[in-house]
Amino acid sequence: MSITVTAPTFEHRRDALGIGVAAPRLSWKTTAPSGWTQASYELRIQRGGGAQSRDVPAVASGESVLVPWPAEPLTSRESASVQVRVTGADGTRSEWSEPAVVEAGLLSPSDWVAMPVGGSWEEDPASDERHPSVLRREFRVRGEVLAARLYVTAHGLYEVEINGKRVGDDAMSPGWTPYRSRLRYYTYDVTGHLAEGSNAIGAWLGDGWYRGRLGWYHGFRNLYGHDLSLIAQLEVRYADGSTEVVATDGSWRATPGPIVRTGNYDGELYDAGIAARLGAWSRPGYDDSAWHRVVAAHRDPATLVAPEGPPVRCTQEVAPVAVLTTPSGARVLDFGQNLVGRVRIRVSGASGDRVTLRTAEVLQDGEIYTRPLRTAKSTDEYVLAGGGPEEWEPRFTFHGFRYAEVTGWPGDLDAAVADGDLVARVYHTDMERTGWFSCSDPQVERLHENVVWSMRGNFLDIPTDCPQRDERVGWTGDIQVFAPTASFLYDVSGMLGSWLKDLAIEQLPDGTVPWYVPVIPAHRMWTPIRPGAAWGDAAALTPWDLYERFGDVRILEQQYESAVSWVELVERLAGPDRLWDEGFQLGDWLDPAAPPDDPADARTDRYLVATAYFARSADRVARMAEVLGRPGDAARFAQLAAEVRDAFRRRYIGPDGRMTSDAQTAYSLAIAFDLVDGAERDAAGRRLGELVEEAGHRIATGFVGTPLVCDALTVTGHPDPAYALLLQEDAPSWLYAVRQGGTTIWERWDSMLPDGTVNPGKMTSFNHYALGAVADWLHRTVAGLAPAAPGYRSIRFAPRPGGGLTSASAEHETPYGRAAISWRIEDSILRLEVTVPTGTDATVQLPGGAPVEVTSGTHTFEAAWPQDEVARA
């Protein structure tokens, strides 16, 4: 078998055009014979369009993930082509890899000359029906173009066209960040868009997160500004070596566009009649004399940053599975899957005909049910121009839905659906899929698929709680519990690394971490910001999760001060007794025993939760300090964690081993967070198993306990009740939603009641990933694939079959390559196969067996399976 090495990648970007660092780290993956290990690598770097080539001498290292940039830093706009060649410990050498190109974006504020420009007409700033503008400018290309780049962002959302052709395929750009501190710009290669002579650049704008309505109970508008402005800088490099810049300035023109109104919550109204009257406004030769002069806004270019992860894109199209007629006579499309995105239509009709699409996640009494959306209208409208087939999809909104009610369709809706004229287009941050799971139980597989769909729907630029109602914010506690699952299923390293920077920006000077990031105000409860356990602990726990899964020390460096600030705040709040037992807490949010309108009223004492998290975060900060070479901090925070553990045991565990909150979450926290050991740990595991049995194997945990309960049972030697929890079909349970026809994870265990009506609580989402955090246990324990060292440099294969499952498998694209495990039980034999990627090693441990060390390659194992387990299977 030959040795092959992939083209390198840069930082956490699949596409390294417009990267925001001058010395990007490199990674590559090697495929080699079993047991082969890398001893050294060489790099070949070509710069200046190939005019300068340099071979970096061999570096004696087995590293292949995020290795340092070996040359002079890139300058703004500079590109380099990089190849890698590796040599093994046995002296064998690969061929040079295919080249990969990295190109720096605008690395200095002084590189920017563009200013924000937009429409100059008066608008009502309190209105949700402000008419977005379109902008344009013409320019000339005077000769042969060697390369052209467009650097662009907006106050609001944008789409750009050059000579009538769309630039890029991203959506909802530039996304949502704390705009005053960080506004992303994107870089596009537009060389192929230009023609010699006259050219035109045009842009659509939408309110988005910048000035559109955000928040609960009718929310707030203009949180970042009243303007709707484009910031664009087109740089044309000619073959003769000269450069020309076309940037947004006072020479641009603007007019109200075909998008009459648009908002994330309420949807979009598009008038194709306006589009027809405007004509080819993004093409050259257009008469814009009746358009308005633009007005400029202010932007500090030091706040413009390059993206660290992929943008939002359409990743899938879903056709309706049925066209329903409701009891009221309404026509409703059922897409068969709760998803996030928009509906695209192709329609013919008369000028002025209006098609309305109203979306919802569920039906009740046969009609689309919109109460869970609260004040979000979730309605898109299209006014036809007439005269032939017209195709349209909203640009600057997104909805969470399975059903779309269609009114005003001019023709046979059933025939249109059959012809593919109405399709749902799925949108989310276009992360690379990296994790898969399957097993012999179709319902568990559907559960896992629901987790994937909820992650996709709620990873739309930021990690949100829900994608459909008047909320859609980046709750810190939700991603804190879900980050391990997310990091297995997708490469979230760039996206979440960027979001954690925003968390640190939004963190208060005293260390308080907001409930959600970016921060928006609230009429009640969430403003002013108060520290809360599990939510604020995202500052310490989520960076560590990313480090464990992706092996990037820089994420710890980047977030260390934020994590320390949080733990030191809790240390002050707890005081000398090390118990955080005062103040506002959400606790084990959405415990199924909590009343619908008081989701924090859980069975587990909220201060028990707070103190447990205090210990966990102190421990993780100690570990961060150790990795970062800060021994003084490591010792200090390790001592703090030990003191909090002791305080926890004294306050919350009685002499008989019972906890003061005799509840599933309390014991799960004590076990999973290593707050008990020895006999106390054994007793906690036994009692947890008893509680599960007493509950009829129904779940009794909320957001905090749910990710931990199956692990806590398994590690204390009680896998049977863990599997019984997993496989329970009656509410509350994971499979209850599956049995009810759910295609995503619900916010509440009973978002839909057994009688088919929606839970009466004011917050009832049918797309909420937090309770799907059990998928991490499916990956690590049911299938048996887990990291044993940061970035999966070492892998642990340790499946724990049970629950009657006869097979399970998992695959994960680690930073080194594909790791896989597959087991099945047949003829009283447990048969196991594992694949260890080149550059890693692994430990394999069958139930009841001794651990076996293996090198890279594929390995198979067999063991007799106990007869009672076979009978259950």
Image (tube, rainbow, N blue to C red):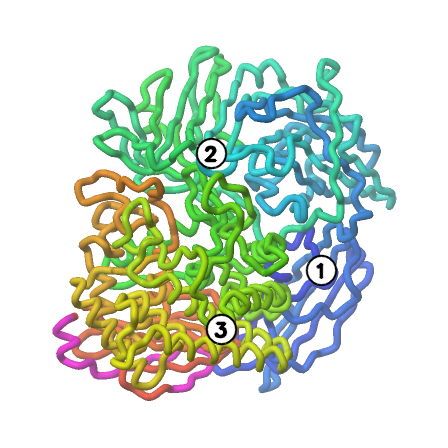
Describe the element under mark 3 as helix, strand or loop. Answer: helix
Whole-angstrom CA distance, mark 2 to mark 1, is 43 Å
Indicate which disc residue 265 carries: 2
Q: Residues within 10 Å of mark 2 (few under 14, many from 20)?
A: many
Q: Name above or below for residue 816 compared with residue 474.
A: below
Hey, which quadrant is residue 152 in on the image? top right
Point 74% across, 77% down: residue: 57
On screen, residue 724 versus residue 353, left or right, reads: left
Of 5 and 486, which appears nearest the observer? 486
Whole-angstrom CA distance, mark 2 to mark 3, is 40 Å
How far across and how far down the image is residue 844, in percent? 37, 81
Whole-angstrom CA distance, mark 1 to mark 3, is 28 Å
Of circles 1 and 3, the one toward us is 3
Of circles 2 and 1, the one toward us is 2
Question: The disc labelled 3 sits on which kind of residue?
Answer: Tyr
Point 74% across, 55% down: residue: 79
Q: Which residue is mark 3?
A: 792
> Quick one: label 1 or label 3, which is nearer the N terminus?
1
Q: Residues within 10 Å of mark 3 (few under 14, many from 20)?
A: many
Which residues fall within the magenta stretch? Answer: 852-872
Of 25 and 671, which appears nearest the observer? 671
Indicate which disc residue 81 carries: 1
On screen, residue 465 versus residue 125, left or right, reads: left
